[in-house]
């Protein structure tokens, strides 16, 4: 402890001196005006008690330098009576950085320590200078002293006021919400913006802990921040939250930033905070994110499209292969079958003398089987040949087709005494061969499934509807139960026992494929025992080869 | 030379035999020559200078490798030397439209391959009749 000055504490005037000297010491030790005042006030408080109720009171002002810190120390001693009030001390404690109170016999010693800034250099020479100064200080009248003290306080108060106003003006003019919080998260100060934006007062915000101000999805994080971190003094707190703009009634994104304010000793005093509107940025962020997601989806879509295209390509290829296979198989199968039929017939006819009845029966059965196979294969061949690749469109006169078909069935028509009545049929854009096939299959069906004892009658008519032609083939044959409609037009389904009737069931399936290939439709109406009408709707001009 | 010569163009040897046997049964004196496809048939005609004069009929199958029936028919009719030789189509398909097309191209007739012995005789008879048309023109007799 380096002693700087002494002041005896006996009366009011000594108090003034004590205050003055304390201020001076603090001043030359480089403390700010407010620090000086604080220190001097602390000293005064304790000194007053001593003057009022102590004996032999004295103030010793020192400078203490230890390894880490530097302090100015006020040491107030007195011979006390036991019931001395130390009110002043209770107050002074809070104003200084360190304090001690000790008793040695009847003497009480109170020490008040105040930090000197570590950057403030003190050496032996300086200490000597200071000591000299105090020794040489001129005495002044107590009245003047009082006056000067008053003036100083006044100036200080004005400065604080000005600073406060400047602060308020600044914070209110910046387009930011600025506020300060105490260590319990309660608002100490808020600039106009916070009040205006939230539409709430400091009191209501404190009461509700900002609940109505912060968006419910962000409130939890917000509360955690307030309740934990504020008390624990993290370096700085940053978070993003949606805050309610009372005027617009909208929740907009804001950035909250809180900085702890620590005093010269590093103790957390309060928090300063500001809130900035970042809604526009947030929207851009979201849009960019959406854009990125969209791009991702686009890429994925492209990839799946490509995959799909590959699948379609493969399917087409596979389909083509199947068609080719069906064609080749059935085509190459036809020839040996034909031979089978011919040679079994040859055997039956040319060698009947050397084969017995049983043998002839076997050969006949062989021939019949071969014939059936021939028909089926022929149908498969036709079916497999109806595909997009082979379609060749031209203007087809359906009348001509119908007449040719009648010609082809000449023998059967004569045999059954059948009548084929052809109405006025139009010219349409179609594949000639397929139209021929279509007509022949339907007519063949009608002739095949005719009533035993009556002559079959087939009426072929056409009806023009918009850009389609609706053909109708009406017969007076056996008819069928409409519940078999779907079956009839699919592969290999037949309604009557194959022994009774020749031929396979592919005929109508081929017709359906032909109709579909032309983007048309085929259907039928019938009642058992009352004949059937087959309808085929075909576009007149449409482009089939999309 | 008074012999009637018929050229059968068909890649299937059984089919050639079936019709050739039928023809021979009706008229044993008829000469029958065969080629397995249109290309070879054309070669025959072009390499043997007077061959075409001796032909009374060409029986043409439609489904053949290298040069099919339709192509052969067109080639024959485009050639000044050969266009007058009677050609008849002998095939497995029985479509009247196809028949019409072949006739339009210049074929005299269109017959389907027989499925029975009777049919083969009937077909052969028909073919021979067509030969007679030519023979009237050329002075040959059957």
Image (cartoon, rainbow, N blue to C red):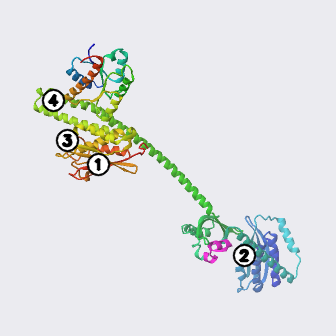
For the magenta stretch, what is the residue range? A183-205
Q: Are marks 1 and 3 on the same chain?
A: yes
Does residue B26 appear anywhere in the picture? yes
Q: Residue at x 56, y 54 (%)?
A: A291
Q: CA distance from mark 2 to mark 3?
A: 131 Å
Task: Tell me the chain of label 1.
Answer: A
Q: Residue at x 18, y 34 (%)?
A: A366
Dot label at residue A534 = 1
Task: Tell me the chain of label 3.
Answer: A
Earlier in the chain: of badge 4 and badge 3, it is 4
In front: label 4 or label 2: 4
In front: label 2 or label 3: 3
**Residue that mark 2 sits on:** A95
Q: Relative to residue A485, is residue A153 depicted above or below?
A: below
What quarter of the picture does the N terminus of chain A occupy?
Answer: bottom right
Q: Are marks 2 and 3 on the same chain?
A: yes
State yes or no: discs 1 and 2 in contact (Cβ < 8 Å): no
Crowd tier of the residue under label 3, counting other residues whose Cα lies within 10 Å: few below 14, some 14–19, many 20 or above: some
Query: Helix, strand or loop at disc 4?
Result: helix
**Residue that mark 4 sits on:** A348
Residue B43, position as x, y percentages in the image? 37, 19
**Residue that mark 3 sits on:** A416
- Residue A364 among magenta residues: no
Crowd tier of the residue under label 1, counting other residues whose Cα lies within 10 Å: few below 14, some 14–19, many 20 or above: some
Earlier in the chain: of badge 1 and badge 3, it is 3
Q: CA distance from mark 1 to mark 4?
A: 41 Å
Task: Tell me the chain of label 2.
Answer: A
């Amino acid at each position: 402890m380096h002693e700087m000055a002494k002041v005896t504490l006996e009366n009011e005037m000594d108090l003034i001196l004590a205050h003055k000297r304390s201020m001076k010491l603090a001043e030359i030790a480089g403390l700010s005006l407010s620090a000086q005042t604080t220190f001097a006030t602390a000293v005064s408080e304790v000194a007053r008690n001593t003057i009022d109720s102590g004996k032999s009171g004295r103030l010793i002002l020192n400078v203490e330098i230890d390894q880490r810190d530097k302090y100015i120390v006020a040491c107030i001693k007195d011979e006390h009576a036991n019931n001395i009030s130390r009110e002043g001390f209770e107050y002074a404690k809070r104003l200084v950085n360190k304090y001690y109170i000790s008793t040695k016999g009847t003497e009480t010693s109170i020490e008040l320590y105040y930090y000197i800034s570590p950057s403030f250099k003190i050496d032996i020479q300086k200490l000597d200078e200071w000591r000299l100064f105090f020794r040489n200080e001129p005495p002044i009248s107590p009245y003047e002293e009082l006056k000067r003290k008053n003036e100083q306080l006044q100036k200080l108060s004005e400065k604080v006021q000005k600073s406060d106003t400047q602060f308020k003006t600044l914070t209110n003019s910046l387009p930011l919400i600025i506020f300060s919080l105490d260590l319990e998260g309660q608002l100490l100060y808020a600039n106009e913006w916070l009040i205006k934006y939230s539409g709430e007062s400091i009191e209501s915000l404190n009461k509700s802990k900002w609940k109505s101000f912060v968006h419910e999805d962000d409130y939890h994080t917000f509360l955690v921040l307030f309740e934990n971190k504020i008390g624990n003094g993290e370096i700085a707190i940053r978070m993003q939250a949606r805050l309610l703009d009372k005027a617009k009634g909208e929740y907009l994104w804001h950035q909250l930033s809180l900085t702890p304010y620590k005093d010269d000793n590093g103790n957390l005093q309060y928090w300063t905070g500001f809130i900035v509107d970042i809604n526009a940025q947030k929207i851009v962020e979201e849009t960019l994110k959406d854009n990125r997601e969209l791009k991702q989806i686009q890429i994925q879509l492209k990839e799946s499209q490509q995959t799909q295209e590959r699948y379609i390509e493969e399917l087409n290829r596979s389909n083509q292969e199947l068609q080719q296979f069906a064609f080749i198989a059935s085509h190459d199968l036809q020839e040996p079958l034909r031979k089978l039929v011919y040679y079994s017939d040859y055997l039956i006819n040319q060698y009947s003398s050397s084969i017995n009845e049983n043998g002839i029966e076997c050969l006949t059965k062989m021939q019949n089987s071969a014939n059936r196979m021939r028909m089926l294969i022929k149908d498969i061949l036709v079916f497999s040949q109806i595909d997009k690749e082979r379609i060749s469109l031209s203007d087809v006169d359906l009348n001509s087709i119908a007449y040719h078909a009648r010609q082809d069935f000449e023998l059967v028509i004569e045999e059954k005494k059948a009548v084929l009545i052809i109405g006025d049929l139009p010219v349409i854009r179609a594949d000639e061969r397929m139209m021929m096939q279509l007509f022949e299959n339907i007519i063949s069906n009608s002739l095949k499934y005719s009533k035993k004892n009556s002559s079959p009658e087939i009426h072929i008519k056409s009806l023009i509807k918009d850009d389609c032609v609706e053909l109708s083939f009406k017969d007076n044959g056996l008819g069928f139960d409409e519940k078999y409609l779907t079956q009839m037009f699919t592969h290999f389904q037949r309604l009557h026992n194959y022994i009774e009737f020749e031929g396979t069931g592919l005929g109508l399936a081929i017709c359906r494929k032909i109709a579909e290939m032309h983007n048309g439709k085929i259907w039928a109406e019938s009642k058992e025992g009352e004949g059937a009408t087959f309808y085929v709707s075909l576009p007149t001009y449409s482009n089939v080869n999309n | 030379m008074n012999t009637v010569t018929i050229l059968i163009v068909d890649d299937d040897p059984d089919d050639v035999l079936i019709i050739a046997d039928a023809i021979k049964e009706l008229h044993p004196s008829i000469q029958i020559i065969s080629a397995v496809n249109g290309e070879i048939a054309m070669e025959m005609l072009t390499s043997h200078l007077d061959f075409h004069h001796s032909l009374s009929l060409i029986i043409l199958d439609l489904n053949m490798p290298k040069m099919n029936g339709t192509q052969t028919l067109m080639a024959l009719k485009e050639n000044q030397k050969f266009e007058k030789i009677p050609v008849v189509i002998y095939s497995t398909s029985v479509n009247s439209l196809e028949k019409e097309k072949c006739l339009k191209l210049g074929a005299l007739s269109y017959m389907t391959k027989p499925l029975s012995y009777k049919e083969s005789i009937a077909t052969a008879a028909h073919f021979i009749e067509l030969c007679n048309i030519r023979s009237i023109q050329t002075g040959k007799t059957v």
